[in-house]
Amino acid sequence: MTPDILEPKLRRAAIMPIVQPRSVDFVLSLVAELAAGGAEAIEIVMRSEAALPAIEACRRAFPELLIGAGTILTNEHYDAAVQAGAQFGISPGFLPSVCAHASKGPITLVPGVQTASEVMAAQAAGFDLLKFYPSEPAGGTVVLADFANIFTSATFMPSGKIQLSHLAGYARLRNITSVGGSWMYAEGSTESVRDRMAASLAAMHSVRG
């Protein structure tokens, strides 16, 4: 999936849950609840042995969803994500060697940036769809609002310490595609996962329209 196809799909999705793959069964159950709450795109991070089989299982079980692989750190991670059926990849940072490798591959890689210099380097390498990470510790909407005025062709997928209360601020920014996080399934909440997912989408759409 090319960036020009992926970007509008992510913008329509508005919220992208980031799933930590404890087990395949855990991921399938969680994604079912997230989808029931309106999720259209899911990022499964490659931080356990369950990640790749979970991506494969989700592609089979939820063909209507966009399933991406997160925490791509190496060329081997990218290739494994492709083999597992991921429709896009996300990296927490910008590593030229990995981005060059991915640019020759079949799925879009979204590299991570935090500074103006990193945005410039990523765009010079041909990447305009970027992850802003970790968003809240790095300045969140304040920084991204400045980036909107400077990097007019770049769009961002912020994640990192974002909570439901932050979403309206992100929704106001024209350079945001979707907002990522795990707040909608954090332990200790009295609300169901699907209700928190639905509330997150409502917070975005109430501003975006």
Image (tube, grey):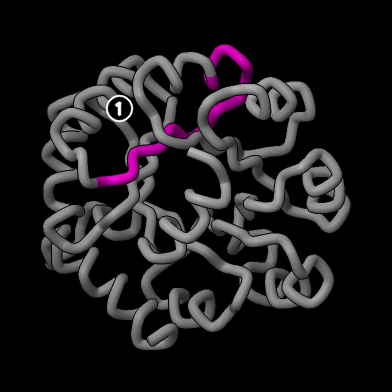
> For this rendering, which residue is in front, 3 or 169?
3
Can the viewer see residue 133? Answer: no
- Which quadrant holds residue 82? top left
Residue stretch rendered in magenta on the structure: 65-78
Above or below residue 19? Residue 72 is above
Above or below residue 49? Residue 34 is below
Above or below residue 102? Residue 178 is below
Residue 135 in the image: x percent, y percent?
Answer: 60, 59
> Residue at horizontal 88%, vertical 51%?
117
Can the viewer see residue 102? Answer: yes
Q: In the image, what residue type sits under mark 1?
A: Ile
Please state, as top left, top right, bottom left or bottom right, where the C terminus lies in the image. Answer: bottom left
Is residue 74 highlighted in magenta?
Answer: yes
> For this rendering, which residue is in front, 66 or 162?
66
In the displayed structure, does residue 181 sit left or right of residue 35?
Answer: right
In the displayed structure, does residue 150 sit left or right of residue 70?
Answer: right
Residue 51 in the image: x percent, y percent?
Answer: 34, 23
> Residue at horizontal 28%, vertical 55%?
40
> Residue at horizontal 52%, vertical 15%?
79
SS assignment at label 1: helix
Residue 163 in the image: x percent, y percent?
Answer: 41, 67
> Residue at horizontal 40%, vertical 15%?
83
Residue 56 in the image: x percent, y percent?
Answer: 26, 23
Q: Which residue is mark 1?
A: 55
- Which quadrant holds residue 180? bottom left
Above or below residue 53? Residue 150 is below
